[in-house]
Amino acid sequence: MGINLQKGQRVDLTKGNEGLSTILVGLGWDPVKKDVGFFGNLMGKGQVDVDCDASVLMLDEYGKVPNKENLIYFGNLNSVCGSIKHTGDNLTGEGDGDDEQIIVDLTKIPKNIQKLVFVVNIYDCIRRKQDFGLIQNAFIRVLKKSSNQELVKFNLSSEYAGKTTLLAAEIYRHGKEWKFAAVGEGTLDASLGEIVKKYQ
């Protein structure tokens, strides 16, 4: 059983976990069920499809994204250095467990990269008029890849209605070790491009 964190808390990942090199970061969420009446339920329209996308920003010592190769998302699933692999896009949030997964080999992250920022945003949110008020049970968790042992979990239980992007968590260097920080900050950024501009 992993450590359950609250917003703002931090925990060591590698310290005390000797030999930990490859982790799996799972992000999950469920669409809010809507009460659409008898006929809507018959037709299977009890919820709205919200396409949430998980991404990773690889930041250097200046807190910047050095280049576009340091942005891992559904359009760029693998980092050039081989340290990060996004397993693919989930369009609806349906089903139990992780909706999107990102595999991180901590030993392959380039020396100039100091922090990984894990972001979830709603695809095409302006046109679809969607925000995180349509999402519930969101979480981010870290597992030891070799054994699927859950190390850390952060349930994003704050109220994010009106927000269109969620800065879920950070994994960052601390000396020779890696730490996990539960961020849970909602923003009004309408696209991944807007988020990245803040780190350029």
Image (cartoon, grey):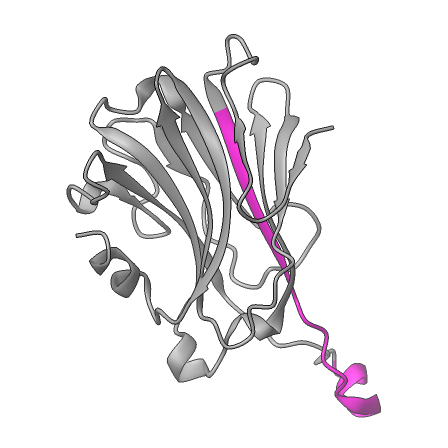
Nearer to me, 46 or 132:
132
Q: Residue 8 location in percent, x, y? A: 53, 46
- Is residue 47 highlighted in magenta? no
Query: Residue 114, located in which quarter of the rendered image?
Result: top left
**Residue 49 visible to the viewer:** no
Residue at (50, 77) in percent of width and height: 162
**Residue 94 visible to the viewer:** yes
Query: Residue 40, located in which quarter of the rendered image?
Result: bottom right
**Would residue 193 be found to the left or right of residue 50 on screen?**
left
Residue at (45, 47) in percent of width and height: 88
Q: Quadrant of the N terminus?
A: top right
Nearer to me, 20 or 124:
20
- Is residue 26 highlighted in magenta? yes
Q: Residue 75 location in percent, x, y? A: 31, 52
Q: Residue 2 location in percent, x, y? A: 68, 30
Which residue is farthest top?
18
How many marks are shown on the rendered structure? 0
Range shown magenta:
23-43
Residue at (25, 30) in percent of width and height: 113
**Would residue 65 be found to the left or right of residue 18 on screen?**
left
Residue 154 lies, with reference to residue 167, above or below; the image says above
Residue 71 lies, with reference to residue 149, above or below; the image says below
Q: Residue 27 location in percent, x, y? A: 55, 47
Residue 44 lies, with reference to residue 113, above or below; the image says below
Which residue is farthest right?
38
Residue at (50, 8) in percent of width and height: 19
